[in-house]
Amino acid sequence: MSKQIITAKEAADMIFDGAVIAANGFMMMSVADEVYHALEQRFLDTHSPRDLSLLSITSVGDGADRGLNRLAHKGLVKKLVAGHLNLMPKLQQMIFSEDIEAYNLPQGVLAQLLRDTAARRPGLVTQVGLDTFVDPRHSGGRINSISKEELNEIISIDGKDYIRYKPFTQMDFAILRGTRADKNGNICTEKEAAKVDALAMAQACHTLGGKVIVQVEEIVDDIKPHDVCIPGVLVDYLVVTSDMAYHPQTAACDYNPAYSGQSRAPKGAMPVLESGARRIIALRALKELRPGIVNLGIGMPEGIAAVAEEKGVSGFTLTVEAGGIGGSPLSGVEFGASLNPEAIIFQHQLFDFYHGGGLTQAFLGLAEADAQGNINVSKFGPRIAGCGGFICITQSTPKLYFIGTFTAKGLKEEVVNGKLHILAEGSIKKFKREIEQLTFSAKRAKELKQEVMFITERCVLELRDEGLTLTEIAPGVDLERDIISNMEFRPLIAENLKEMDADIFA
């Protein structure tokens, strides 16, 4: 049965007032950007449709103007449910000004909830999110005062607390992307750097009676069954992109076959990490890397992949939550893609593995921490980054490493003769008396008996039963001047305080 082929404008014209739109993508990977461009143009020309609700499992955007940033117009959007918001700054502004309702739930939870909605299950029951801001006993994921819905609840099973995340009840359109479609609407994704949630989103939308729209590069006569990512029975309309500028592989790359596994980049293709705090932190973190399966989070942890390749360190498999397994995860606006991946699976499948404790270690960003070892990576005044996969990963992994600079905004340093010198201190202290939002619970980590370490360019701290404890200090750094005076609390000091390994500063 041939599928209807429409233009992006015709797709945009189908969307009605109050519609719920599910948007697949990870940053700009697998994002049907031409459809969003057409929808924006329709609204600017006609002031319709209005009051849309958006479901975004991750950030669907480039940190500037593309993806769901195109829809950030007052009146066009009424509500946003998302796992991550950092690459959607225009929608963040609307949340902060309370022009839209907004809810932030763990990325893996939302991905799995698509599958549960598709199967008409009563939601997702899990302990992921307990004792964090998404716990309904805290804010339940509501991130401004006009957001009143209760998207989850506490239930008890065998005397233990769980969160039930409620299934989606409306999904009028799922806007997806693939590489090719055949005449029956079967979709393959061989040029995509990540498939993200394409299949589960199509299934959930189909179950709820919505329409599935897929943007592709071309229509072909036939696609082999094993190559099909989204079966044609789930697809209602095809949009063939008119301009590949609306179909980039990542936010920074039109197409690199080594991102999608169609070829392999030679050794040394990863950029060398420049000297400075980022390199020092990555080298110190590299010393903790052990054989096994590892997750690298967004931001500072991305540098570990670069120094691991540079130093020829092997024996582990790096993963990134978009679905990439193996290879070297990329950084910046290309985070979520991997160079030379061994496999690219659906996001919810990888989170099944994460939630089940499959990771050996996880290296994640460090934004704010308090004396108890609690961490905030999700909200900083008007900047609402969102929790992403952070909660899913930190509550399920036995060994956790939070890495980042000791202070932020303006930090300058240099290494001379193997010693670290702070030339200008950052104006923002990261170790605070009180954090703004609870994304990681030290109390829960202790209950789960997790090993937790904080790695910065000038010191290392560990979460111990008695509290946050300083265990290592960089050569050339003064304990009181460079560390204690730049914290809003005094940490415990290990009796055998060590100097960080000299080779890190060579």
Image (tube, rainbow, N blue to C red):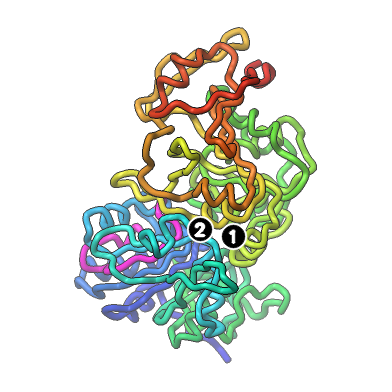
Q: Are marks 2 and 1 in contact (CB under 8 Å)?
A: yes
The quarter of the image holding the C terminus is top right
* Along the viewing direction, whichever of 81 and 354 lies nearer the viewer: 354
Separation of residues labelled 2 and 1 (CA atoms)? 8 Å
Amino acid type of disc 2?
Phe
Residue 111 x, y percent position in the rendering: 53, 67
Numbered circle sitting on residue 194: 1
The quarter of the image holding the N terminus is bottom right
Residue furthest to the top: 417
* Along the viewing direction, whichever of 414 and 386 lies nearer the viewer: 386
Query: In the shown orientation, is residue 334 left or right of residue 103?
Result: right
* Along the viewing direction, whichever of 432 and 288 lies nearer the viewer: 432
Which residue carries the number 2 mark?
26
Mark 2 or mark 1: which comes first in sequence? 2
Which residue: 42% across, 70% down? 152
Label 1 crowd (10 A; few <14 / some 14-19 / many >=20): many
Residue 151 x, y percent position in the rendering: 39, 71
Image mark count: 2
Which residue: 32% across, 71% down? 149
Q: Which residues are magenta?
A: 69-87
Residue 480 visible (yes or no): yes
Residue 127 x, y percent position in the rendering: 55, 64
Query: In this rendering, is residue 4 above or below 243?
Result: below
Q: Report helix, strand or loop for mark 2.
A: loop
Quarter-wise, where is residue 344 in the image?
A: bottom right
Residue 85 highlighted magenta (yes or no): yes
